[in-house]
Amino acid sequence: MAALQRVFGKNTAYWLIGPAALWLAAFFAFPMLSLLSTSLSDPAGSPITGYQMTFRIQNYVEALGDYWPYMARSLWYAGIATVLCLILGYVLAYAIAFKAGRWKNVMLVLVIAPFFTSFLVRTLSWKLILADNGWLVESLQWLHILGEDGRLLATPFAVVMGLTYNFLPFMILPLYTSLEKIDPRLNEAAADLYSSPWQRFTKVIWPLSLPGVVGGTLLTFIPASGDYINSDLLGNPNTQMVGNKIQTLFTDASDYPHAAALSVILMVLIVGMVLFYVRRAGTEDLL
């Protein structure tokens, strides 16, 4: 640091921030401005001839009016998947942090092992697991949990299960990091004061793990809301999410202004929900 200060003097901080600022400007600020500009353009144009900037606010009204069911369905599916990930992830992260012992590193490797396979392949594997003639459906039919003509694939259940599976590691890792930092002596002190295991969890473990809970839910909910692969491969036309409509408008219909408007609406909704959630959770330090 002293060497840098000798070279750059009082401007050392600006030189250190410079590369990151340029990166953000090139790959975040400029694309965002382009997206906003496209969302306000006249949809009468085309990707070949271009779109004329007319500040057409009506694009947002039309996008929201036509596709609000997809927006609501995306937030609903992502919310359910996030809750499932929190329940499953917290149990597993707690076991790794406090109970795994010498198997801790092995379990952590198993958590991140799915990242060695592509997102698409992992989702396709669920298509085989939930297939109508697969072992899971046949077992549930044999147990009379599913009817003879019952199925799991191409249902909302399949889409939510796919989202839960694919984004579960994003929940586990922040939770594990928070739980690992908790001093075990706090739990022992609470036990010495005759608190029950449930009281120790609710009064000691849970409050101290809240930063991991908030971080994990954000890392899970935000990408799940915009996901379209799980709905595309595991769902049906009635389970399509807003990501599917954005993809269709961009690639098939070439309706860039409405696709951009829908993207901006989704982004604003998620940012608003994140700000509300973080403030309610009392962890504004994450902002």
Image (spheres, helix red, strand yellow):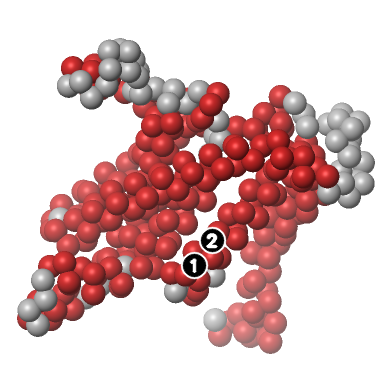
Q: Which residue is mark 1?
A: 278
Residue 13 to residue 248: above or below? below
Task: Categorize mark 2 by other alpha carbons within 10 Å: few (<14), some (14-19), many (20+).
Answer: some
Residue located at (23% from left, 69% from top): 202
- Horizontal and vertical percent for residue 87? 29, 51
Residue 155 spot, x, y in % from top left = 42, 26
Task: Answer left or right for 76 relative to 24.
Answer: left
Q: Say which element carries label 1.
A: helix
Q: Identify the residue under disc 2.
A: 274
- Which residue is depicted at the point 7% across and 79% down? 194
Disc 1 crowd rating (10 Å Cα; few below 14, some 14-19, many 20+) is some
Q: Nearer the viewer, residue 270 or 148?
A: 148
Figure check: 66 above or below 29? above
Q: Amino acid at mark 2?
A: Val
Q: Residue at x 20, y 68 (%)?
A: 201
Q: State the residue in front, 57 or 263.
A: 57
What amino acid is found at the position of numbered circle 1 in the picture?
Answer: Val
Mark 2 and mark 1 in contact? Answer it, CB < 8 Å: yes
Q: In which quadrant of the rendered view does residue 164 lie?
A: top left
Q: Give the quarter of the figure containing the N terminus.
A: bottom right
Image quarter hosting the C terminus: bottom right
User: Residue at image x 43%, y 61%?
Assistant: 215
| Depicted 277 relative to depicted 263: above or below | below
C-alpha separation, residue under disc 2 versus residue under disc 1:
6 Å
**In the image, is 34 to the left or to the right of 269?**
right
On screen, residue 57 above or below 51:
below
